[in-house]
Image (cartoon, grey):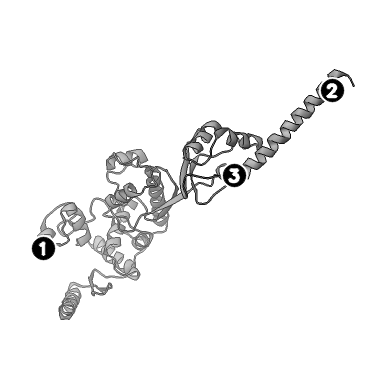
Amino acid sequence: MTRAKRYAALLVALVFGLALAAAGWLAYYAHQPLQPARLPLSFTLEKGSSLRSIANQLVGYGIIGKPWQFIALAHVLGQATKIQAGSYELTAVVTPLQLLDKVTRGEVSQSQITFIEGWTFKQLREALQEHRALKHDTSAMSDAEILQALGVHNSSPEGLFFPDTYSFQNGASDLSILRRANLAMQSRIDELWGIRAAGLPFAKPYEALILASIVEKETGADSERAMIAAVFVNRLRLGMKLQTDPSVIYGIGDKFDGNLRKRDLSDDHPYNTYTRAGLPPTPIAMPGLAALTAVFNPASSAVLYFVSRGDGSSAFSTSLAEHNRAVNEFQKARKRKP
């Protein structure tokens, strides 16, 4: 064997040996437990980041020690371009291999927010603002600016968002939650409008939404929603005033102190359904699916009045005389209670 061939053979052996050593080291590194700064630990990989930037972000969070080690592992395993941006959470010690698997599969951490039936838009905004996992893009926006950002052409946001529980990736914009809730409400209204009962006194779906918000606030027992909806639908058909306290309270706004007085019922404003006939100009809250369903398909009944029995249920009447007797009966019953 010539000297040149011996050198070539040695070089090949050296390269092969180095490759084996590197592979052995990489295998060792891949399976060594990482020691994060703390557990549980939440971290976010920014969208559009390069592999080097991602590795540096992981170093910054105290998850890995040296960026080049993680970079080498990702390249060798062919995962360099497959890491997904998003918010993640480590709840236990992991190896670099497990960490790489987590971020390439996009096992992002998620949170939830729940909007409650009967909430006003003000309460909804407060819930969004208080949620720490959300990005608060709407903080400095007015209600009108939020609607503009969502592409919603309404003068008021009240009642336009469906009450439900929404899951989201940590760090998501609160505007994205509002968009989903608005689309969910619109979808349900469109569906119910297509199967609504005949002869309803609504020229457009928005009017049904307004009444559904009133039914939501007026209902004490779930089983009575369709009957309460029937009361208000029948009143609209006959041109009677709705005379619903929740609408008046909504119109009073922040000045309401919890006590609805007689003068409040005679103080005229657009939401006073004692002084004005027809529907108020906007919804007064977020109606849930049950309230929406009740309004689009109310009970088949001639009822025009209802009064609380004091136990969460209501007594319904078809005439004023019958209603007055019921009011007198349950008022006396409440006075007799110790």
The residue at the far left in this view is 263
Residue drawn at 90 percent across, 22 percent down? 1
Which numbered tag is attached to residue 101? 3
Q: Is residue 235 visible?
A: yes
Task: Please tell me whether mark 2 or mark 3 is closer to you in this view.
Answer: 2
Residue 278 found in image quarter:
bottom left
Please name the amino acid that badge 1 sits on: Lys
Relative to 289, is 42 above or below?
A: above
Give the Cα separation between the discs numbered 2 and 1: 108 Å
Q: Is residue 260 left or right of residue 63?
A: left
Which numbered tag is attached to residue 56? none
Q: Position of residue 37 (x, y in %)?
A: 47, 44
**For numbered disc 1, what is the local secondary structure?**
helix
Task: Please tell me whether mark 2 or mark 1 is closer to you in this view.
Answer: 2
Q: Position of residue 163 (x, y in %)?
A: 36, 55
Q: Position of residue 64 (x, y in %)?
A: 53, 40
Q: Which residue is mark 2?
A: 6
Q: Is residue 70 left or right of residue 289?
A: right
Along the line of sight, which residue is nearer the eye, 215 or 106? 106
Categorize mark 3 by other alpha carbons within 10 Å: few (<14), some (14-19), many (20+).
some
Q: Position of residue 118 (x, y in %)?
A: 30, 58
Nearer-N-terminus badge (2/3): 2
**For numbered disc 3, what is the local secondary structure?**
helix
